[in-house]
Each structure stands twice: as structure tokens, then as C-alpha cells.
Image (cartoon, helix red, strand yellow):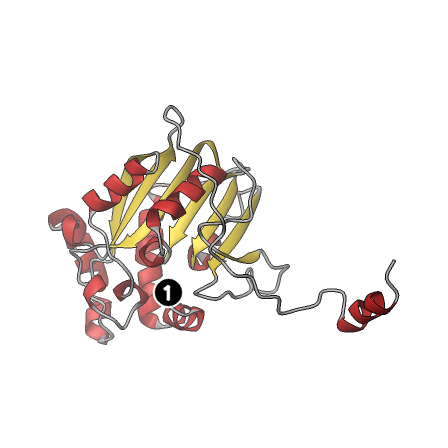
Amino acid sequence: MSVDIVDLREFYHSPLGHLAEQSIAMALSSLWARLPEERLVGLGYAVPYLDRFRADTERTFAFMPAGQGAVNWPVGELSSTALVFDEELPLPDSSVDRVLMVHSLEFAENPHETLKELWRVLAPGGRLVIVVPNRRGVWARMEHTPFGSGRPYSRSQLTSLLRETNFTPGASAEALFFPPSKIRIVLKLRHVFERMGRRFWPVFSGVIVLEAQKRLYQGLPVAARASRRVFVPVLAPQGVQTMRMRDVHPR
């Protein structure tokens, strides 16, 4: 079950959330420096990290799963947010260059189908970065942060999943070595924890950050399947009165 959008936003507005964002952003910057003129999609709740890349991209979208909910992004600008089902993205084949998954894969109903859908929309040579809770880390065991919900992964599990869905795993990084504590003295020592963790116990990081590339030399079987989703209309875009007039005076 996905974490609610309100809880995600509140976490990233908290002091602990700000520090978590800094740690993960540092790991991301070691994999992706700049994305000049590329098309980037953030899937899940990636908006705290998309601002770091979108200045260089051709365009950037924030896709938020229906079970989580959505918020407007960027703030104060025309919205680049879409509410989606992660197995049925509203994009044509080979239409984006990069995908950043944060608070996404661990909540996916069917991780294989989600990754196959990302394979479909990524262009040849497209790259995917997944940020996922580490099964061995302490953050996955604490429920007061979003990283304590959903399905955590080990590095070997994530690598196997990517290979099974036609991705080639590549560079990786780690983040969140400091404990998810709200005690001020612990938070002040976060730089010490981060530095020592990267050097001495990287296997116990709070999250795994792994990049993968779309693999082209092995085809995926194509099977027609009916959508399992039920779409319920909530708005009449042309107005209720207009719809009534059309019913009375059909063309």
C-alpha cells in the first residue's frame, strides 16, 4: 500500500526529511551530473529531487501513482504533474530518456509489470535510477519515515529484478547512513555517520541507489492484456450544462 501524498510532503518538510533529501541527492549527483536536453520523468514522489535536474532537461514530468495521490509541481508554475497507474503510463513507446523512481518500486503492485512499462517508454539507451529502501538498513525498520513502508530490497534482489525485465544494472551509490532519529545531537552528527558509513559499512545504508540501462538485444514477449483498472469520471470538462444541451439537441 502506498504512503499518502500528505505524509510524504510532511516528511520532506520536516528537519529529518530535509537531511534525508540532502543525503539522497548527494548519491544521485554521483550517478547523474547533468541531463542536457533530455526528457526526464520522476515516478513516485520524486519532486524533492527533480528540481536539481530540470534546469538542463528539455522537459521534466512528475508522475505520481493513483494510490498515493498527487500535488502540483513545480510550485507557482504550470503543472507538470500527472496522476498515473505505474503499469499503464500515458506515454508513447521510446518517448523519454531518463526515469527517476523514488518512493515507487517498493509500493508497486507488480514490480515486474512496472519495470516492463518503464522499459517500453524509455528510448534506446535510456537510463533508469531507482531509489529503494535497503532491506539491511535501519531506515526500513522504522515506520515514522516513508522508507519504513512498502517492500524493501537487497542489492542482489534489485539487480535480479532489473535483469529479468531487460535492464542492465550499472553504477550504484548508497545514502542514509545516519539513524532516522529526531534527536538533535544525532542529526548534528549526521556527517560523521555518513562519512563512516560509506567507508566501513556501505551494505547497511538506508537506501540503495542503482542506475540501469534499457537493454535492446533481447526482446520482451508482447501479450495483449485488458486493463485491470477502473476509471471513474469525476469532472465534466465541458460543463454539466453543455452536456445536457447536447442530450437535448443531439447533432
- Identify the residue shown where x is 39% and y is 28%: 219
**Percent x, y for residue 235?**
66, 69
Q: Is residue 70 above or below residue 135?
A: below
- Identify the residue shown where x is 17% and y is 62%: 138
Q: Nearer the viewer, residue 167 or 147?
A: 167
Q: Quadrant of the N terminus?
A: bottom left
Question: Residue pushed farthest top?
Answer: 217
* Label 1 sits on residue: 2
**How many discs appear?**
1
**Percent x, y for residue 15?**
34, 71
Q: Is residue 26 above or below residue 7?
A: above
Q: Nearer the viewer, residue 12 or 115?
A: 115
Q: Is residue 33 visible?
A: no
**Percent x, y for residue 50?**
47, 53
Dot 1 falls on a residue whose secondary structure is loop
Q: Is residue 103 left or right of residue 138?
A: right
Residue 82 location, quadrant: bottom right
Q: Is residue 146 left or right of residue 244?
A: left
The type of residue carrying mark 1 is Ser
Q: Is residue 135 visible?
A: yes
Residue 109 location, quadrant: bottom left
**Percent x, y for residue 199?**
14, 47
Q: Nearer the viewer, residue 6 or 186?
A: 6
Q: Is residue 10 above or below residue 102?
A: below
- Identify the residue shown where x is 50% and y is 55%: 63
Q: Nearer the viewer, residue 42 or 235?
A: 235
Q: Is residue 146 left or right of residue 200?
A: right
Residue 73 location, quadrant: bottom right
- Identify the residue shown where x is 52% and y is 61%: 230
- Classed neighbour count for the residue bearing mark 1: other residues with Cα under 10 Å, few (<14), some (14–19), many (≥20): some
Question: Residue pushed farthest left?
Answer: 200
Q: Quadrant of the C terminus?
A: bottom right
